[in-house]
Image (spheres, grey):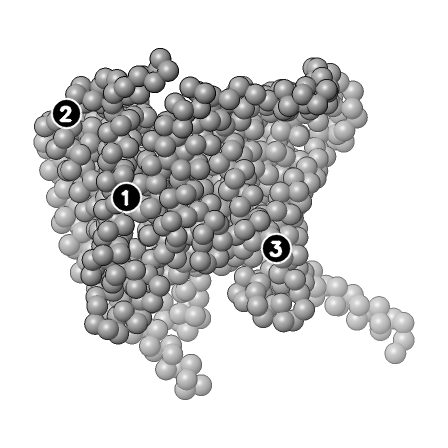
Amino acid sequence: MEVVLVSLLNGLVYGMLLFMLASGLTLIFSMMGVLNFAHASMYMLGAYFAYSVSRLIGFWPALVIAPILCGALGALIEMYALRRVHRNGHIAELLFTVGLAFIIEKGVQMAWGLLPVPYRVPPVLDRALFHIYGSNFHAYRGFMLLISVLMFVAIWLLLTRTRIGLVIQAALTHPEMVGALGHNVPRVFTIVFAGGSVLAGLAGVIGGNYLVTEPSMAATMGPIVFVVVVFGGLGSLAGCFVASLIMGLVQTFAVVLEVSFADLLAHLGIQVTSSTPLAEVLTIPLPRVGALLPYLMLILVLLIKPRGLMGTRDT
Amino acid sequence: MSDGAVETAARVVAAQRTGSLFRRQWPWLAALAFAVVVPWFAFDWSTGRHSGFGVSMLSQIGIMIIFALSYNMLMGQAGLLSFGHAVFLGLGGYVTAHVVTASRNGFPLPLELTPLVGGLSGLGFAIVLGYFATKQRATAFAMITLGIGELVTSCALMFRIFFGGEGGVSTNRMTGHSLLGLAYGAPIQVYYLIVAWTAFSVAAMLLLTRTPLGRMANACRDNFERAQFVGYDPRMVRFFQFALSGAFAGIAGALYTLTYEIVTFDTVAGPLSANALLMTYIGGVGVFGGPVVGAVLIVLLQSWVSLLSNSWLVYAGVLFILMVTFAPMGLTGLVMMHQPIWRARRMGLLVGPYLRLLVPGLLVMMGFVLVVELCSFLTIGAAQGKSLTLGKLTIDPRSATPWLVASALLVGGGAWLRSAVGVFAVAWHAVTEHLKAAGAGS
């Protein structure tokens, strides 16, 4: 029981972190029509910027400055590069983001080195918040949860209750009509791209010290965020939210449940020994398979329901 | 008509056919001849040895040519963007490694035919995985292949019996079974085996583009709805194309195993798939030979520049981004753009503007290279205890001078390049307008 409750909380924290990344990605997808492979790179840059800024003036200013830097970079990329590449078609646009992710990874290696940097949780939050069945719930996890819930409420209010939010929503689905009504659609696109980058940067700031800040963090996070976005349904924020939580819970529970197919078969009265065919596959414990689960989910959902959970258009 | 006349006519036709084969395919035959003689340029006559570095690089070029061309069967010819193509190279390589080991223990398979095993296993895996992947097209297809790539990579690290875990599977190619009686101990013998299989694969893939399947793949790429109206099932076209491209990637994987005698999870992982994309796109997806150019260029860059610099991947990435932004048809596409101008004998008008681009372009490139090298020496190089030298001159990345030089090169060269590009654009516009007018007039 305690395992379930603790894992539930951890899964929630991880799921909300995923949602912070995935929500920006799904908005950018609705706008560009292609997946942005450089999105996880913004997450990585957020973590590295926060590390550098927090060494100079502390963690709290970094919480604001690093996402703004990421947003500014995103705006520059959209205005000066993506718009030009857009003329060469969807594939070129997608490949551009692939190349960008590649260069950002190499650039980070050159600027901050190949090894993980010591980006730590601020001392104020580096303690237990409360105890639950003898295990600690870390205060920083509570802080992450708070930030991500605040962010969730903020973008929901922004998109549904403000004028610019309504214009953004309209521009994502009917750009020509919105343009004809006199709104500056290219600027809306820049805002969306920059906003998505800000969210990714913020996720990097609060996720970088919770996980590890290293040059391969974009490559490990990127595919998982893709899975979340595709699983939830491209372009759907609600689906994205549900998928993030599912993915957070799946990944957390997969780590703590020490079972394998062999255990399952033992319940059915079949004993697996080393001479059984496929013994290696059957006896592998679930925590080691955990890394496979997101990709299995991705392939399954694309085969069975290509629109994802709540998607409105085909991938 | 008498029999003799028919015979003569047939002989003339046959002669014409070989003649036209020679005329039309001479670049391929020249490339083949070059591949056969090129190792002897680096032959050390005093010791009677081949340059190990040279032969290994040439072998890698051969393998990557097959790999990039098989990737282009999907990307260029069928319009399918795959992020998991290395899976078939890697799996073909793993199967070959096991077969070669079995062959050492008595299984009588000549080493020359092991690439066939790699190709068949690549085909088999591509049939199984392609059954799922080709259900979708466009972005969904790309995402499924991404998932398959990650899935197989994780499996390769997880399972020990087939994949050998993190250590990979190693083998020994001196099996004692050979059609030609060769031992294949020396890398040069394997190189000629690679040349033979590369020639075969290139010819086969070239012929495949002329079959109805190849044509339908193009049709489904351009407009899959119309292809459906003609009565073809685009999914089956995608499936066949995917399976065959997996087979050729498997051949490349087998040759990889024979060259390195070890297969690790790197051969199925994302970076190699990305490499296929890089080679194919930089070379050009629109021309059949494009990926060949890309493969040669990237391998040269990889083995040559990586000796000089830590950051060759940055250069490859920047080249890729520049190609995507300014030349989406790749290097061969750029060359093909000049074909009508060349035919109209108007190239002379462009020589001047091109020369004017050369100097500022080189300046900007030097500035950029300097900045990248300075950055990498501040962090990675410092950690490895290396120092940056240019000829006899040692450059200290911590002093201000090299940074000032680099930024001067970038800013000054950039401004100059901008004006030169303006001049070039005017000249290019004039020439193409002239060609259009001439085309309309005739």
Q: Specify the quadrant that holds the N terminus of chain A.
A: top left
Q: What kind of residue is marked 1?
A: Phe
Give the mark nearest the N terminus, 2 or 1. 2
Q: Nearer the viewer, residue A15 or B132?
A: A15
Q: Is residue A235 visible?
A: yes
Question: How many neighbours does mark 2 have within 10 angstroms: few (below 14), some (14-19), or many (20 or more)?
Answer: few
- Up-down relation of residue A310 to residue A264 (above or below): below
For label 1, the SS is helix
Q: Badge 2 is on which residue?
A: A55
Q: Residue at x 41, y 48 (%)?
A: A239
Query: What separation in Å lies between label 2 and label 1 (alpha carbons)?
Result: 28 Å
Q: Badge 3 is on which residue?
A: B238
Q: Badge 1 is on which residue?
A: A152
Is A56 on the left or on the right of B380, as rendered? Answer: left
Question: How many neighbours does mark 1 have within 10 angstroms: few (below 14), some (14-19), or many (20 or more)?
Answer: some
Quarter-wise, where is residue B264 in the image? top right
Question: Which one is in front in this view, the residue at disc 2 or the one at disc 3?
Answer: 2
Query: What separation in Å lies between label 3 and label 1 (alpha carbons)?
Result: 41 Å
Q: Chain of mark 3?
A: B
Do the residues under discs 3 and 1 have CB atoms within 8 angstroms?
Answer: no
Is B387 on the left or on the right of B92, as rendered? Answer: left
Q: Residue at x 40, y 65 (%)?
A: B338
- Up-down relation of residue B434 to residue A291 (above or below): below
